[in-house]
Image (cartoon, grey):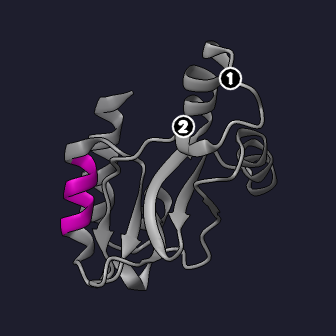
Amino acid sequence: MKIKDIMTHNVETLSSDSTICEAACAMEKADCGAILVKEGDRLVGMITDRDIAIRAVANGLNHETPISKVMTEKIRYCFEDEEIQHVAENMADIQVRRLPVLNRDKRLVGVVSLGNIASCRSQKASATVLQGVAKAH
């Protein structure tokens, strides 16, 4: 089974010129702690609640500061045509709970999370990713 079969398709994104305040509001609305950041149709980073707390608030930045100033730019991702087990192993190795999913043109098409993998009916993939993420916390 491929990642495209289990990923979440409707992904909340913001543009890199969105403000820290807009990012926090989007996280509240989506009930999540991370939002992917795009410029046009290209994925350029991710903004997390931790980025806002550590890189913005702790440094006295204004709520109108563009998220491009505090977002994480180098993010890991997977491709929609990759096998679930391979992605689960990768997520375990790098100890992450979610990965953006790109097509082979490197355009954002979704996101795969620990929950997606846990519910995919592959006990091996679920166990792999859960073990890796458990090591991180």
Mark 2 nearby-residue class (10 Å; few <14, some 14–19, many ≥20): some
Residue denoted by label 2: 69
Q: Which x, y percent locates residue 34? A: 58, 47
Residue 31 or residue 41, whichever sits in front: 41
Q: Amino acid at mark 2?
A: Lys
Image location (x, y in percent) of residue 118: 43, 62
- Horizontal relation, residue 51 to residue 32: left or right: left
Q: Is residue 99 above or below residue 20?
A: below
Tell me: residue 98, above or below residue 95. below
Q: Which dot marks residue 61?
A: 1
Q: Does the magenta segment cover residue 87?
A: yes
Q: Which residues are magenta?
A: 86-92
Q: Quadrant of the N terminus?
A: bottom left
41 relative to 76 in the view: left or right: right
Task: For mark 2, give the secondary structure.
Answer: helix
C-alpha separation, residue under disc 1 versus residue under disc 2: 10 Å
Q: Is residue 78 left or right of residue 29?
A: left
Give SS at disc 1: loop
Question: As shown in the figure, which amino acid type bears the numbered disc 1?
Answer: Leu
The residue positioned 39% from the left and 83% from the top of the image is 4
Quadrant (top left/top right/bottom left/bottom right) for the C terminus? top left
**CB contact under 8 Å: marks 1 and 2:** yes
**Residue shown at 68% from the left, 15% from the top:** 60
Name the foreground residue: 115 vs 31: 31
In percent of width and height, residue 28 lies at: 79, 47
Q: To which quarter of the image does residue 122 belong?
A: bottom left
| Placement of 62 over or under 87, stated as above or below | above
Picture residue at 52% right of the left edge, 64% below the top: 38
Question: Residue placed at 64% from the left, 53% from the top?
Answer: 17
The mark tally for this picture is 2
